[in-house]
Image (cartoon, rainbow, N blue to C red):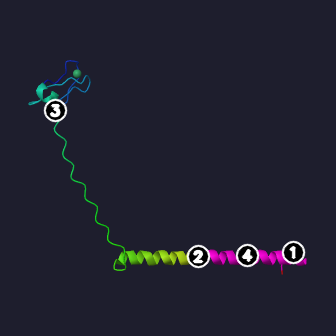
Amino acid sequence: MPEYCTCGAKLPPDARFCHKCAKPQYDYPGTDDAQIVSEPPPLPVPPPLPTALAAPEINFRNRIAVKIGFLAALLAVLATGLITFGLSVSGRSVAWILRCRALGAGLV
Ligand SMILES: [Zn+2]
């Protein structure tokens, strides 16, 4: 192994290429041109895609489906209640304000 490249750069021990001019410093065993131009190795066959698990039926025996159904119903009831309560309160407030203005009195 030469210690200096032909370009004059000092090579580290076991250098495969010159770090300055990129000249290869020795030939690899088994790297001939025939291998370089040969076809790349065949791509590995991808594993078969996992078949989608059969979705369980949605019925009252499916506990997860029942839980999700109850949760959705609970959220719907709560949301409806909040909306109804909010509309009721705001509607009554507006009615009260209009009544007080009509009577010429302050907001009592
Ligand atoms: Zn060099």
> Which of pointers 3 and 4 lies earlier in the amino acid sequence?
3
Contact check, label 4 and label 2, Cβ < 8 Å: no
Residue of label 1: 101
**Residue at position x 78%, y 76% in the image:** 95
Q: Residue at x 19, y 47 (%)?
A: 45
Q: CA distance from mark 4 to mark 2?
A: 16 Å
The answer to whether residue 32 of the structure is visible from this angle is: no
Residue 42 versus residue 54: which sits nearer the camera? 54
Percent position (x, y) of residue 5?
19, 21
The residue positioned 81% from the left and 75% from the top of the image is 97
Label ID, residue 80: 2
Q: Quadrant of ligand 1?
A: top left
Query: Dot 1 surroundings within 10 Å: few (below 14), some, or many (20 or more)?
Result: few
The region drawn magenta spans 80-107
> Mark 4 sits on what residue?
91
Asked whether 83 falls inside the magenta stretch, the response is yes
Residue 39 disc label: 3
Callout 1 amino acid: Arg
Disc 1 and disc 4 in contact, CB within 8 angstroms? no
Amino acid type of the residue that numbered disc 4 sits on in the rendered structure: Gly
Local packing at callout 2 (Cα closer than 10 Å; few below 14, some 14-19, many 20+) is few
Report if residue 93 is visible in the image: yes
On the rendered structure, is 32 left or right of 7?
left
Q: Of callouts 3 and 2, which one flags the residue occurring earlier in the amino acid sequence? A: 3
State how far apart marks 1 and 2 are (Cα): 31 Å
Give the percent coordinates (x, y) of residue 81: 60, 78
Q: Is residue 57 above or below residue 7?
A: below
Q: Quadrant of the C terminus?
A: bottom right
Residue located at (55% from left, 77% from top): 78
Of 103 and 2, which appears nearest the observer? 103
